[in-house]
Amino acid sequence: MKQENRLVTSSSRSWWRNCALHADEEIIAIDAMEDRIAPLTANLTQIRELITGLELCHHKAARWVYNIVVAIGIGKTSKGLGTRSQGRQHPIETVWQNACTALSAWNAGCPADKVDLLVDTIPASQLLTCLGGRSPLKQWQVQRVIEKTRSLINWPHSRDDPAAEYAWLLLSVGEYEFTYLDRCPECYKDHEEFWQTTVRTFIRDTENGDQANLSLALAIDNLWPCHWNFAENLQIVLEAIGGKLNTDTPFSACGRNISLVPIRGRMETISNTLMAFCGTLESGQDVDKELLELLGKQAEEKRWLAASLAKTIRLQLNPPADMRAISSMAGPDWINKE
């Protein structure tokens, strides 16, 4: 794969907020392409917004990328948030609901081996057994896991319902930015001891191949149901609640351990194909001829979109140092102090 240019030259445009804080020379060149075709049509803007909304850690990322390539080829799209037919449910939503149902049953006193559900391919009884015996602390922590999951899955309440709102444990979060909290949130003051214990419990795993310590609070905050590795991440969290802090597999979330994403090879091929369409691919790289056909004839607008998508994919698969530092979830310094 072509080596990324890491030269930081300026702040990046908002289009790049899902993959770069600063613009390198390649991004600046792509932005110049945008300037040459300005003003953007509504269709171009909509397709570019799809690229900006892309997250390769999402369980449907491969499909989203394909849809974007199709949109670039035909010059318009009907895809995006809120375009699914009402009443349709993706199979993964059953996984999320089963996770919440199983955890709620455990918190209510149901024996782990009596919960007959599957969370993806993992029996719920196996996940619940990780928790060990009940205690007020464990039940409080499990409730946080339930609330985090429910806040994102439109079940049993809509995400817009105040009842579905999740109170972050250690993060103050915006769309593409966050800060760490420096004190117990007001809503957890009645159980501040539980909060402190959760914050200072560390999962020992690896991040980008290096040994890492991950706060249990941050793991819960970053337990995204839409993530490709949700069930395994959930098991890591439940094992930590149960006292097993050395993980068999790394915790993955957003850009953390993105190198493990199972579609990595496919995304590299798609990025190569987009670069080939733009005429910027080095020889000897794999391309997908069917995708090239979908892209159709070259045009400046298509080249801008294709270059934007290719760069976004490459930056997400191989994040710049500043983006990697953000996604490492190292936590604030104070949690490591007595």
Image (cartoon, rainbow, N blue to C red):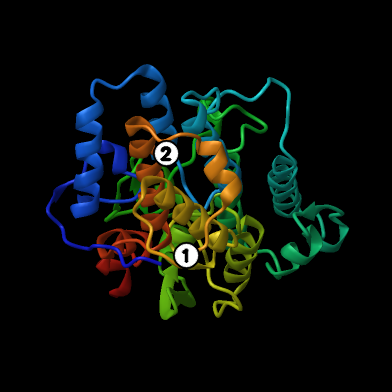
Quadrant of the snapshot with the N terminus: bottom left
> Where is mark 1, residue-wise?
285
Quadrant of the snapshot with the C terminus: bottom left
335 relative to 124 in the view: left or right: left
Choose between 28 and 166: the one closer to the eye: 28
Choose between 107 and 67: the one closer to the eye: 67
**Which residue is found at the position 57% from the left and 50% from the top?**
289
Could you say where residue 76 lies in the image, as x and y percent from the top left?
48, 23
Alpha-carbon neighbours of circle 1 within 10 Å: few (<14), some, or many (≥20)? few
Q: Give the alpha-carbon distance from disc 1 to disc 2, as whole Å.
A: 23 Å
**Which residue is found at the position 67% from the left and 32% from the top?**
156
Q: What residue type is disc 2 on?
A: Ile
**Which residue is found at the position 43% from the left and 46% from the top?**
277
Could you say whether the residue bearing mark 2 is in a helix, strand or loop? helix
The answer to whether residue 156 is above or below residue 87 is: below
User: Between disc 1 and disc 2, whose residue precedes?
Assistant: 2
Would you identify the image quadrant in which residue 153 lies?
top right
Which residue is at the far left? 9
204 relative to 333 in the view: left or right: right
Could you say where residue 81 lies in the image, as x and y percent from the top left?
53, 28
Would you identify the image quadrant in which residue 52 lies?
top left
Q: Which mark is residue 51?
A: 2
Alpha-carbon neighbours of circle 2 within 10 Å: few (<14), some, or many (≥20)? many
**Nearer the camera: disc 1 or disc 2:** 1
Q: What residue type is disc 1 on?
A: Gln
